[in-house]
Amino acid sequence: MNLTALLGILLGITGGLFGLLYGRKKAAQNRGLDERHAEITKNALATGWKVTLIAIYVFWLLLVFGVQFSVAEVLGILLLIHMIGWAGFRLYYQFKY
């Protein structure tokens, strides 16, 4: 087992959870957790999943055309696409609403 990869995954999860909890605490102190915040979060998550679904279809098409991927590559790429889509649409909806 690759110890560096395991450490990176654990640090990523820990850092993400810390950022999420700290960000929500600061937003609550500044009265930022309102209906607007809930609507932006809901729309960003829904659109992020739509982007991920499109990426899954692209991977299926690539598989049909004979391109070979490992499971780890596909899952890693899908995770990146989902997180970038979620964050990108979060910013988009933040400026839209």
Image (cartoon, rainbow, N blue to C red):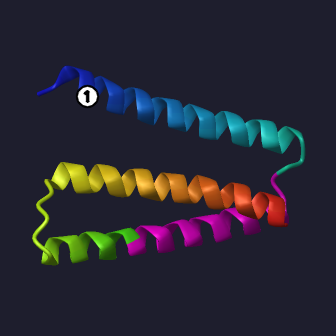
**Along the line of sight, which residue is nearer the eye, 40 or 57?**
57
Residue 57, horizontal then vertical, whole percent: 32, 76
Q: Residue drawn 41% across and 74% down?
A: 54
Query: Under tag 1, what secondary structure?
Result: helix
Q: Residue drawn 41% across and 26% down?
A: 11
Q: Is residue 36 above or below residue 87?
A: below
Say left or right for 46 vs 65. right
Q: Is residue 26 above or below residue 69?
A: above
> Which quarter of the rendering shows the C terminus?
bottom right
Say left or right for 45 vs 75. right
Residue 17, horizontal then vertical, whole percent: 53, 37
| Residue picked out by circle 1 | 5
Region of the chain picked out in magenta, as a range: 33-54
Residue 7 part of the magenta-drawn span: no
- Crowdedness of circle 1 by 10 Å Cα count: few (<14), some, many (20+)? few
> Which quarter of the rendering shows the N terminus?
top left
- Disc 1 marks which amino acid? Ala
Say left or right for 68 vs 56. left
Q: Main secondary structure of the magenta part?
A: helix
**Along the line of sight, which residue is nearer the eye, 1 or 63?**
63
Residue 95, horizontal then vertical, whole percent: 82, 59
Rendered image quadrant of residue 38? bottom right
Residue 42 part of the magenta-drawn span: yes
Say left or right for 11 vs 20. left
Rendered image quadrant of residue 52? bottom left
